[in-house]
Image: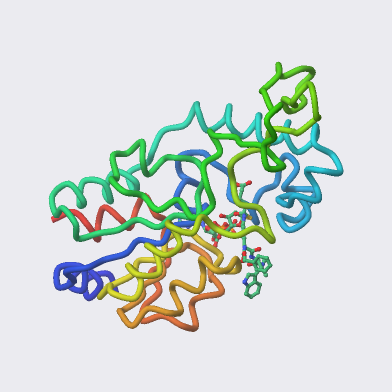
Amino acid sequence: MIEPVRQWVRDASRIVVLSGAGMSAESGVPTFRDAQTGLWANFRPEELATEQAFRANPAMVWDWYVSRRRMIERVQPNAGHFAIAAFQQRHPGRLTVATQNVDGLHQRAGSPGVLALHGNIADDRWLDPPRACCRQGPVLDGSPSRCATCGNLRRPAVVWFGEMLPAAELAAAEEAAARCELMLVVGTSGVVYPAAGLARSTRGRVVVLNPQPSELDDAVDAVLAGTAAALLPQLLEE
Ligand code: BJW
């Protein structure tokens, strides 16, 4: 099946890559719903990646993000990230990356204009709208920094369940999806919306790249059963 998809890549003047956690699995970043270690092994993402979970136990959730940040700093983009970035450099303006990943690996591989739909784990922001008094205090005992005056907490600048995606990135991704001739859906279970909806809304061809079945398989033109680092170089390199 790979040769027809290679031909679709050659024919398409506008391509979208919609990536999920499996994109970074071969860099050593655990996926969400396969993770066997850490908090993901004991909590469902819907229980942990929420404002309510952070407010109920800020130290636990913050500590989990600190450990993930440290892990991500130590890993490198893989052959899949690099194949996408090299294609974009050879064909400026032809391929847009919309990613659910917060790890920054597409950007570190050299992809320009990445649409980071769920934010960036390296950044943080105020939990409540900042007041005049809000100044970042020291990080103590692994707990998030808080304003010494009003107690407002710093939190990771990622998108938790029940929160809006960044409006500009989502609008740009929706426009790219609406206009593309080919969408490569790489390494996502396809259960989280509105990101998964991008694959269902495009009128272009849609191809899933995933070693396991995903929720989107019923809605697409082809499924390539394989990994991101193995398949993307075969599809995108000339
Ligand atoms: C490989 C591989 C290899 C492994 N190569 N592949 C419509 C219907 C139903 C529900 C909703 C809906 N619209 C909105 C909702 C609610 C909710 C939602 O989607 N819920 C569902 C769970 C039912 N969505 C939201 O709340 C979103 N916000 C929103 O809609 O705002 C509007 C609104 C506000 C208020 C009220 C109502 C509406 C926000 C979603 C935020 C998701 N956040 C997280 C955490 C980010 C921060 C962090 O990192 O900590 O994002 S959760 C987690 O899931 C993370 C991921 O980006 C996301 C998707 O996971 P992903 O990437 O698919 O990973 P996995 O692990 O699930 O899958 C990995 C895949 O890789 C697997 O298939 C493997 O086989 C594969 N694989 N190795 C290729 N080598």
Q: According to the image, what is the colour scheme of the structure?
A: rainbow
Nearer the observer, 160 or 39: 160
In-front residue for pair 86/224: 86
**Against 38, is 90 above or below?**
below
What residue is shown at x 49% (from left), y 59% (from top)? 167
Question: In the drawing, does residue 194 fall left or right of residue 209?
Answer: right
Left or right for 230, reference 156: left
What is the quadrant of residue 96 in the picture? bottom left
Looking at the image, which is closer to me, 174 or 181? 174
Which quadrant holds the N terminus?
bottom left
Q: Quadrant of the C terminus?
A: bottom left
Residue closest to the far front: 132
Q: Which residue is rendered at x = 51% and y = 61% of the image?
A: 188
- x and y, in percent, of residue 99 in the image: 44, 54
**Residue 37 in picture, x, y percent from top left:** 71, 41
Q: Can you give x and y, in whole percent of width and height, for residue 17 in the image?
A: 35, 61
Q: Quadrant of ligand 1?
A: bottom right
Q: Position of residue 173 (x, y in %)?
A: 39, 64
- Report the residue at 36% width, 36% height from top: 108
Numbered circles on residues, count:
0
Q: Residue at x 78, y 43 (%)?
A: 54
